[in-house]
Image: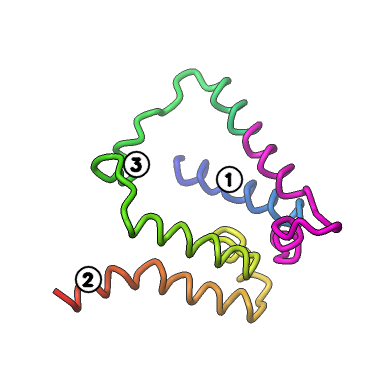
Amino acid sequence: MRFFVNFLLGVTFGFGLILSNVLDPKTINLFLSGSPKWDPSVILTILGIILASSLSLIFLKKPNTNFKNNFPISEGNILNRQIVLGCALFGVGWGLSGLSVSTATINLAFNEWQSVLFFIFMILGFYGPQFYKKITL
């Protein structure tokens, strides 16, 4: 049952990205550019996500707020070099390509070479640091 609910939520999220045209890197680039052709659809998409999430939390009888078991939480609230560098690289990659993790994954279905290339480097970015730590120890 849990798999079905998660699958349904993922399909709904993906459909929302397609419907709002956030999958198109040009939409993100126009949003981030601040040019006269500025596109507010990204903000509207984010507001829609916040609204849907808020309503679901309001109508749930007992929301699951036990995030410690579901997410890896670093010890302490310290911003270290890896966190800042990772955030900066994500922002630069999003700004240059117009793709994020979710949009790159969905764009794989459309078989565009840019999305495939982005996805390959995204996977390298996910697992590269772990591999690097293993070979340098």
Distance of mark 1 from mark 3, alpha carbons? 19 Å
* Image depth: mark 1 or mark 2 in front: 2
Q: Amino acid at mark 2?
A: Lys
In the rendered view, tell whether residue 115 sits above or below residue 25.
below
Q: Which residue is mark 3?
A: 70
Q: What span is colored magenta in the figure?
A: 23-51
Q: Which residue is mark 1?
A: 8
Dot 1: element:
helix
In the rendered view, tell whether residue 81 sits above or below residue 109.
above
Dot 2: element:
helix
Q: Earlier in the sequence, mark 1 or mark 3?
A: 1
Q: Which residue is mark 2?
A: 133
* Image depth: mark 1 or mark 3 in front: 3
In the rendered view, tell whether residue 59 sits above or below residue 126.
above
Q: Earlier in the sequence, mark 1 or mark 2?
A: 1
**Is residue 42 highlighted in magenta?**
yes
Q: Residue at x 57, y 77 (%)?
A: 116
